[in-house]
Image (cartoon, grey):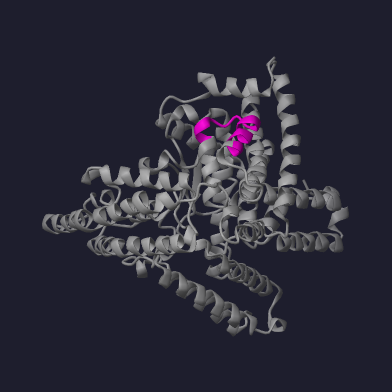
């Protein structure tokens, strides 16, 4: 039984987070704060920082000797998460919150589009939230101004992309404006007068309040912030920038690896995967070198769809095939549904190839695999299997949806605490698992898998190159061009992603290498008793974990099987 003090702390901290971040509450299916938005001003961050420090202090007062083994994992996971944040606060990284991938200019219209407007009450809550947009955006401007005063400014290419996104939002006619579009469907079963009144209020708010606030945001960025944006790509150029990046790498990977060690590991992985690519190229009978083969893959029209609709339909077909084979590899499957949808038009041009959004815990919203269909000629078909297995099943959707359904874990662990090295490492492992599931039978699709594996290896090199070794964007792009078949558009998007999220790109390959190492260890020590579904159950059964805790969990699982004598029975897969 969980000690009352620990249970109160987990529950109390989680409830405070829901109140402090209403957007997070909405995504958890909790409607209590649907009428509010978070405070993005310096005052809002100060309250969050105080809450984290206070909670860590309370956690350290709890006697660990009274905690069960499973609750001890929860204790340790929370302690790690809080300590990492406290360690990072002095670097003032929140002042770099300008983001062309998940910035305020994108998240707010997306959030509004996901809110239930079927009833007048739900519609009014969304209207109340819309009325908070001005304070939300203006508060974020205060944070950016503080960043300018402290010399903590975003890289110029990122600022330019955010300005371009705001231009698209401001130029859109009202009926297609992303802030008004969610309010256009009339609430079901409402009288015409009520419908007209509510929609009229939404129109007024967008025209009179939201659009002017977006205009102020855009003008500040273009006229004042952009001239002060840093010319250097990496955060090394900021005050305490080298320390900041080393902390970012530790937090992201949940390891003590130094950036130079990660860079060296990445170069080793690039060489290994490149040799596999060369072997496959030769087996296909292509006479030129690897760069020539990359150029052929970029040019050949048969490798590309013509329309966004064709792209989405193929992704959906791959999902259906993957879902049909999951039972052979997993003991438990998530109850939550998965849908494949397009990245919104106003965000697609500068966004990544794809991303996943987890479902609402109450089942009111499915998990979403967002596929970027902008410029179909930059979306190769031979990469689609690997990408789907990563973002959907058995990758992010299977792992994250299952995590929310684990019984006995506090919501703080299943919904808020996240360790990217585990989450992204699992998804990259899932790409490779596709070979065992019957995917990549087309050699070009197998080459696509290698492209994606190489891409993640290159991330170790390029992310550390930019932020620790002082590479510029051109050198980073040249390395990706030389070693991957990614299109020019995808390479540009990738490089600018690293500028926004220093350290995050390291998590994929670092996490995958650890998971593969643990599987190899289990197979070797358990012999014929190794059971792959049981191993996957062990990996996923406690949600996302720091990699050292995951290693300890797998080690304990192996030890229990060996102690029981099952390792010698040879009855597994």
Q: Main secondary structure of the magenta part?
A: helix
* Bounds of the magenta segment: 475-490
Horizontal side of residue 304 vs 504, given as left or right: left
Location of residue 475 (image quadrant): top right
Q: Residue at x 73, y 25 (%)?
A: 278
List x then y, in percent, for residue 221: 37, 52
List x then y, in percent, for residue 56: 59, 77
Q: Is residue 362 visible?
A: no
Q: Is residue 561 visible?
A: yes
Q: Quadrant of the C terminus?
A: top right
484 in the magenta segment: yes
Above or below — where is 187 with respect to 22? above
- Please name whichever residue, 360 or 425, is drawn nearer the observer in this view of the structure: 425
Above or below — where is 563 with respect to 8? above
List x then y, in percent, for residue 40: 40, 65
Q: Residue at x 84, y 63 (%)?
A: 564
Q: Residue at x 52, y 46 (%)?
A: 497
- Please name whichever residue, 415 or 275, is drawn nearer the observer in this view of the structure: 275
Location of residue 35 (image quadrant): bottom left
List x then y, in percent, for residue 420: 60, 55
């Amino acid at each position: 039984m969980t000690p009352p003090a620990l249970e109160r702390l987990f529950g109390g901290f989680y409830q405070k987070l829901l109140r402090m971040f209403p957007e997070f509450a909405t995504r958890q299916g909790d409607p209590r704060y649907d009428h509010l938005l978070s405070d993005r001003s310096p005052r809002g961050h100060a309250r969050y920082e105080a809450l984290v420090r206070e909670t860590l202090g309370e956690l350290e007062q709890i006697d660990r000797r009274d905690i069960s083994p499973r609750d001890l994992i929860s204790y340790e996971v929370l302690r790690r998460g809080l300590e990492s944040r406290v360690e990072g606060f002095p670097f003032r990284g929140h002042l770099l919150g300008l983001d062309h991938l998940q910035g305020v200019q994108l998240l707010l219209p997306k959030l509004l589009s996901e809110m239930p407007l079927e009833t007048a009450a739900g519609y009014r809550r969304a209207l109340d939230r819309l009325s908070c947009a001005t304070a939300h955006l203006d508060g974020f401007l205060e944070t950016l101004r503080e960043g300018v005063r402290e010399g903590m400014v975003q890289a110029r290419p990122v600022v330019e992309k955010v300005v371009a996104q705001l231009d698209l939002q401001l130029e859109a006619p009202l009926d297609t404006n992303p802030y008004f579009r969610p309010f256009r469907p009339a609430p079901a079963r409402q009288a015409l007068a009520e419908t007209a009144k509510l929609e009229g209020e939404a129109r007024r708010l967008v025209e009179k309040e939201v659009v002017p606030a977006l205009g102020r945001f855009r003008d500040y960025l273009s006229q004042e912030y952009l001239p002060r944006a840093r010319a250097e790509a990496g955060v090394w150029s900021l005050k305490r920038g080298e320390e900041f990046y080393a902390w970012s790498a530790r937090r992201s990977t949940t390891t003590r690896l130094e950036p130079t060690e990660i860079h060296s590991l990445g170069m080793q992985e690039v060489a290994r995967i490149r040799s596999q690519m060369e072997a496959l190229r030769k087996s296909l009978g292509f006479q030129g070198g690897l760069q020539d083969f990359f150029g052929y893959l970029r040019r050949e029209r048969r490798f590309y769809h013509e329309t966004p609709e064709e792209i989405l339909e193929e992704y959906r077909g791959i999902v259906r095939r993957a879902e049909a084979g999951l039972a052979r590899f997993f003991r438990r499957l998530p109850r939550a549904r998965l849908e494949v949808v397009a990245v919104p038009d106003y965000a697609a041009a500068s966004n990544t190839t794809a991303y996943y959004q987890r479902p609402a815990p109450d089942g009111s919203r499915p998990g979403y695999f967002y596929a970027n269909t902008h410029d179909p000629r930059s979306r190769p078909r031979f990469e689609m299997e690997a990408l789907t297995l990563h973002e959907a099943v058995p990758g992010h959707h299977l792992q994250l949806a299952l995590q929310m359904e684990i019984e006995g874990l506090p919501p703080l662990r299943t919904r808020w605490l996240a360790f990217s090295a585990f989450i992204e490492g699992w998804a990259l492992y899932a790409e490779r698992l596709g070979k065992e599931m019957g995917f990549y039978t087309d050699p070009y699709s197998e080459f696509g898998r290698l492209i994606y594996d190489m891409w993640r290896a290159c991330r170790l090199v390029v992310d550390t190159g930019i932020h620790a070794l002082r590479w510029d964007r051109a050198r980073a792009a040249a390395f990706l061009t030389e070693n991957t078949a990614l299109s020019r558009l995808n390479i540009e998007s990738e490089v600018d992603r690293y500028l926004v999220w220093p350290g995050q790109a390291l998590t994929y390959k670092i996490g995958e290498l650890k998971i593969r190492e643990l599987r190899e260890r289990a197979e070797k020590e358990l012999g014929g008793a190794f059971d792959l579904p049981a191993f996957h159950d062990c990996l996923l059964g406690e949600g996302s974990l720091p990699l050292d805790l995951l290693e300890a969990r797998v080690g304990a699982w192996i030890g229990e099987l060996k102690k029981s004598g099952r390792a010698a029975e040879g009855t597994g897969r």
